[in-house]
Image (cartoon, rainbow, N blue to C red):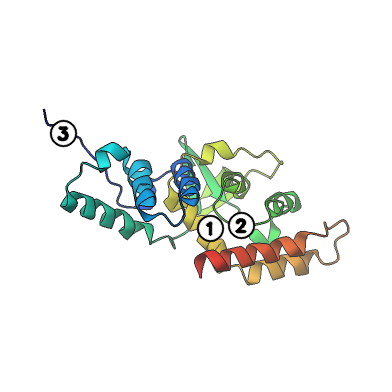
Amino acid sequence: MKQTIQITVPTDWSAITLEKYLKLHNDLKSYEGIDAAQTALLFYHLCDLPNDYLMGLDVDTFTKIKGDLEGFMQRTDLPMQKIIKIDGKEYGLEPNLSKIAYGAYLDIAKYETFQIDNNWAKVMSILYRPITKRVGDLYEIEKYNGNIDGDKFLGLGMDIHFGALFFFVHLLEELPSFILKSLKDTPGIPPNIKSTLEKSGEAIAQLYS
């Protein structure tokens, strides 16, 4: 008896959560250089299609789905979303990066590289905090208190995460130099800050150049 299955194919990054993306990313690294295995992982993680079903697809269907996936996956330089919603509550991106809390900056810097990896949800938790006051597009967010809860960001679409990442990628050249200049004469600066910023820049340049 022939079995009919329904395949849901995402068409943009909003349909892919950070949690799903990280699982895919980590699995792809394990099969680097093995094209067939990596393609199977794309279908498995993004379309929830096990490998035994993948092997039974006709060539036209396989080619169409693979093309759709590769089409949107190449578009990662997405617009930054300053205000997002999590469980019905509004969160806002740090509204004034030049006045970011020293503690928030240190907590971000300790992750050494600024990229979407297993620490990214924690970074987002530092950058996006609950909105306490809003008038139109202007808003205030909770003061940084050192509490980092990355789990709530795992369920957000990758359109939000890529938007935030590339916002900082575009600021990469000016932001580290600005922070270093503003902190130059501040006592108690950890000695690894400059090297951390440089590593972040090098990693982003390699990944996205």
Q: Are marks 3 and 2 in contact (CB under 8 Å)?
A: no
Quarter of the image with the N terminus is top left
Question: Which of the two labelled residues, at mark 1 and mark 3, occupies the earlier sequence position?
Answer: 3
User: What residue would you read off at disc 3?
Assistant: 4
Percent coordinates x, y for residue 20 in the rendering? 44, 42
3D distance between C-alphas at marks 2 and 1 = 8 Å
Residue closer to the observer: 11 or 60: 60
User: In the drawing, does residue 186 fall left or right of residue 66?
Assistant: right
Q: Residue furthest left?
A: 1
Question: Which of the two labelled residues, at mark 3 and mark 2, occupies the earlier sequence position?
Answer: 3
Residue closer to the observer: 149 or 55: 55
User: What residue would you read off at disc 2?
Assistant: 114
Graded by Cα atoms within 10 Å as few (under 14), some (14 to 19) or many (20 or more), the crowding at tag 2 reads: many
Q: Nearer the viewer, mark 1 or mark 3?
A: 3
Q: Residue at x 34, y 46 (%)?
A: 40
User: In the drawing, does residue 126 fall left or right of residue 45?
Assistant: right
Q: Residue furthest top?
A: 1
Percent coordinates x, y for residue 67 in the rendering? 26, 57
Percent coordinates x, y for residue 179 in the rendering? 72, 65
User: What residue would you read off at disc 1?
Assistant: 165
Q: Is residue 184 visible?
A: yes
Question: Which of the two labelled residues, at mark 2 and mark 1, occupies the earlier sequence position?
Answer: 2
Q: Are marks 2 and 1 in contact (CB under 8 Å)?
A: yes
Residue closer to the observer: 13 or 139: 13
3D distance between C-alphas at marks 3 and 2 = 44 Å
User: In the drawing, does residue 200 fall left or right of residue 65?
Assistant: right
Q: Residue at x 76, y 60 (%)?
A: 193
Query: Residue 36, relative to residue 44: is it above or below?
Result: below
* Dot 3 amino acid type: Thr
Quadrant of residue 198 within the rendered picture = bottom right
Helix, strand or loop at disc 1? Answer: helix
